[in-house]
Image: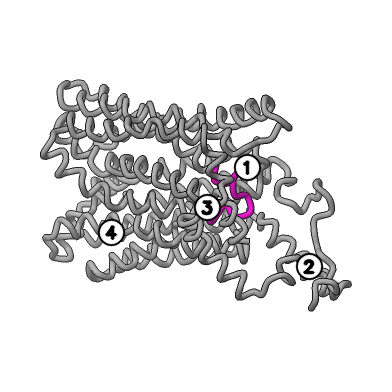
Amino acid sequence: MKEMDTENVDFEGPNDPAKAQNWNAGKKWTTIVVLALMTFLSTLASTMFAPSVPLVMKEFKSQSSTLGTFVVSVYVLGNAIGPLILAPLSEVYGRAPVYHTTNFLFIICTAACALSVNMSMLIVFRFLAGAMGSAVLTIGGGTITDLFVAEERGTAMAVWSLGPLLGPVIGPVAGRRVYIRCNRLAMDLLDTHDCEKTNQSAAVAIAYYFFVPESYSPTILKKKASHLRKNANSNARFKIEFTHSSRLVLYRAIIRPFQMLMFSPIVLLLSIFVAFVFGQLYLLYTTITFVFEARFHFGTSIAGLSFLGLAVGMLLGAGIFGALSDQTLKSRAKKSENCEMKPEYRLPIMVYGAILIPIGLIIYGWTAEKTDAWIAPIIGTAIVGTGMMATFIPTQAYLVDAFPLYSASAVAANTVLRSISGAFLPLAGPPMYAALGLGWGNSLLALIAILLIPFPAFLIVYGERIRKSSRSMNFASRIQ
């Protein structure tokens, strides 16, 4: 059908209630809360399994420490691969179908982990569970773009961001609770972990299915066009339906995250920066319990206290920097010409994160090595947690503001590098601490972080120029 023979379907003005940004506040925040819970459960699974590794290794008669570490980190590898497919699919078929399908498959894969009969089967299904669980990590940013205008996204981003950051913190604590409760064979413990995750995930998935409708505007308009064709107007089409073939739309969607990493310098730079920060966080996740057990003689029953600082710091950072993100955007927009809300107005908050993270690492490392007061290193990790939120929130908000229609693909590109870093950087933690000690080991991480402090300032000054560079503009037209 030629374009001249069709009627382009669009919203009935800017206040059309069918558009997700015009939903009432209750409906919007129900979506965000359920989405945050889904994200929390997905990331909880990445580390909840860790305390069970010794028993599982015994059950499967394996003595490889590398394999024991890999069975935990392979989940994060799934988080790196899944977004490359799932995010583009959400931009072709909508958010809801991808959420519902991946939620169901996540439950199946988690149950399969509980039923694994050997290490290979467990690793495969841990990887697949990570890939399916990555949908909420990746598409969540796109859903926030669907629901909120730019000046309201910071707070929503803060609530949603707590999931991927708090989940790995609570995971080992919950895992150790099960470890203490169950004095059985390793396989029974594995069953308990994964059955709990399966039940929790199923409950949240059901809640999402009934309470959260489709929010992606192109999908809503395609459904509207389909309804019109069935009832009155056989020529009604959403514009993409008659400007591109379905195969071309799907192909462009699948390669879009790769294009963003390859052809958009601003996406690549932010992804590398966040990958390093996220890798540091996962290094703390995987080593902090052992540090507090060996240095401060924390027993298994109270080992969860070692994560208290990170959790409190993240909650504090979410509250402060989530609100500050929107305030900074609106304040700078008022002072600019035409009151334009540029994505770069999100970036000043990153300076706080770049400064807080190395300070927290130094306090954590040296107090853990030189003092007997366990609260001192926990204060250090709280500062790190606060700094992490000051980095994570503006990065995610910048990507969805800069690429609103393709925000899921932009976040996917960012998620890939940070997940790879989170999977492999922690492997260097034990050898580094063994060679340098806690003080100098964390000082080395802090030194690298200090060297990156100018990076946010560089983006504040040159970010808009980089985003609007000829190469980036050519890329922008290429993904349409």
Q: Which residue type does callout 1 highlight? A: Trp
The residue singled out by tag 2 in the image is: 225
Span highlighted in magenta in the image? 398-410
User: Depth-wise, is mark 2 or mark 3 nearer the camera?
Assistant: 3
- Residue 143: percent from left, percent from top: 60, 51
Report the side of 285 relative to 400 (left or right): left
**Residue at far front of view:** 470
Report the side of 406 relative to 371 (left or right): right
Residue shown at 66% from the left, 56% from the top:
216
Q: Main secondary structure of the magenta part?
A: helix
The residue singled out by tag 1 in the image is: 29
Indicate the secondary structure of the residue bearing disc 2: helix
Q: Which residue type does callout 3 highlight? A: Ala
Indicate the secondary structure of the residue bearing disc 1: helix
415 lies above or below 129 = above
Examine the rendering and report whether any part of residue 303 can be seen: yes
Please say if the residues under marks 2 and 4 sit with CB atoms less than 8 Å apart: no
Q: Which residue type does callout 4 highlight? A: Leu
368 lies above or below 178 = above
The residue singled out by tag 4 in the image is: 190
Residue shown at 25% from the left, 60% from the top:
188
Going from N to C along the chain, the mark reached first, 2 or 1, is: 1
Indicate the secondary structure of the residue bearing disc 3: helix
Q: Which residue type does callout 2 highlight? A: Ala
Neighbourhood count class around disc 2 (C-alpha, 10 Å): few under 14, some 14–19, many 20 upward: many
User: Depth-wise, is mark 2 or mark 4 nearer the camera?
Assistant: 2
Please say if the residues under marks 4 and 3 sit with CB atoms less than 8 Å apart: no
Residue shown at 27% from the left, 31% from the top:
447
Report the side of 33 relative to 235 (left or right): left
The residue singled out by tag 3 in the image is: 410
User: Depth-wise, is mark 3 or mark 1 nearer the camera?
Assistant: 3
Report the side of 16 relative to 123 (left or right): right
